[in-house]
Image: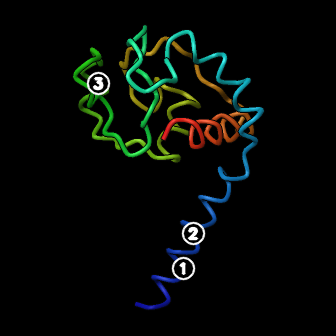
Amino acid sequence: MGLKIIALTSMVMLASVAHAEGDAKRGQKLYDECIACHAPERGAQQGVGPSLFGVIGRKAGDNNDFRFSPALKRSGIVWSERELDAYIADPQKKIPANRMPYSGMSDARDRADLLAYILVHFK
């Protein structure tokens, strides 16, 4: 049992390091693709998409101020680095029939940088 816990803890730490190594400054530039739809400020008026402020740890579709797709609400996802990474890579693959009109960000390094920016600025 002890070895399993150590192994699991190590895997979680390694997964966290992968995104923690992203370049938040470069991620800010990548966020320019997102800002047209997703406001960065807390309490900002909702745009085409919801504000990303406080997204980490929030249940997908759990914001009464925004009209989410039924697919997103039913997904059961709680946004973590891993879930956001998969969603940003290919939103329609991660949650088919969601309303986000974005084809995805295929480059893993770009996603790591974007996530580093989100983790630093949207808490």
Q: Circle 3 sits in a helix, a strand or a loop, which is it? A: helix
Q: Splitting the image into 4 quarters, where does residue 5 fall?
A: bottom left
- In x, y percent, where is residue 100? 44, 16
How many C-alpha atoms fall within 10 Å of the one at disc 3: few (<14), some, or many (≥20)? some
Q: Quadrant of residue 102?
A: top right
Q: Amino acid at mark 3?
A: Ala
* Left or right: 18 in relation to 58: right
Residue at image coords 58%, 18% = 34
Q: Earlier in the sequence, mark 1 or mark 3?
A: 1
Q: Position of 78 compared to 20: left or right?
A: left
- Label 1 vs label 3: CA separation? 34 Å
Q: Can you identify the residue that label 3 sits on?
A: 71
Residue at 64% x, 23% y: name it: 31
The residue pinned by badge 1 equals 7
Pointers 2 and 1 in contact (C-beta within 8 Å): yes
Q: Position of residue 101 (x, y in %)?
A: 49, 11
Q: Secondary structure at mark 2?
A: helix
Q: Along the polypeptide, which appears first: circle 3 or circle 2?
A: 2
Q: How far is the residue under mark 3 from the one under mark 2?
A: 30 Å
Q: Which sits in the foreground, 112 or 8? A: 112
Amino acid, disc 2 = Met
- Under tag 1, what secondary structure? helix
Residue at image mark 2: 11
Disc 2 to disc 1, C-alpha distance: 6 Å
Residue 14 in the image, given as x and y percentages of width and height: 63, 65
Q: Quadrant of the N terminus?
A: bottom left
Q: From this view, report whether residue 61 is shown above or below residue 45.
A: below
Three-letter code, disc 1: Ala
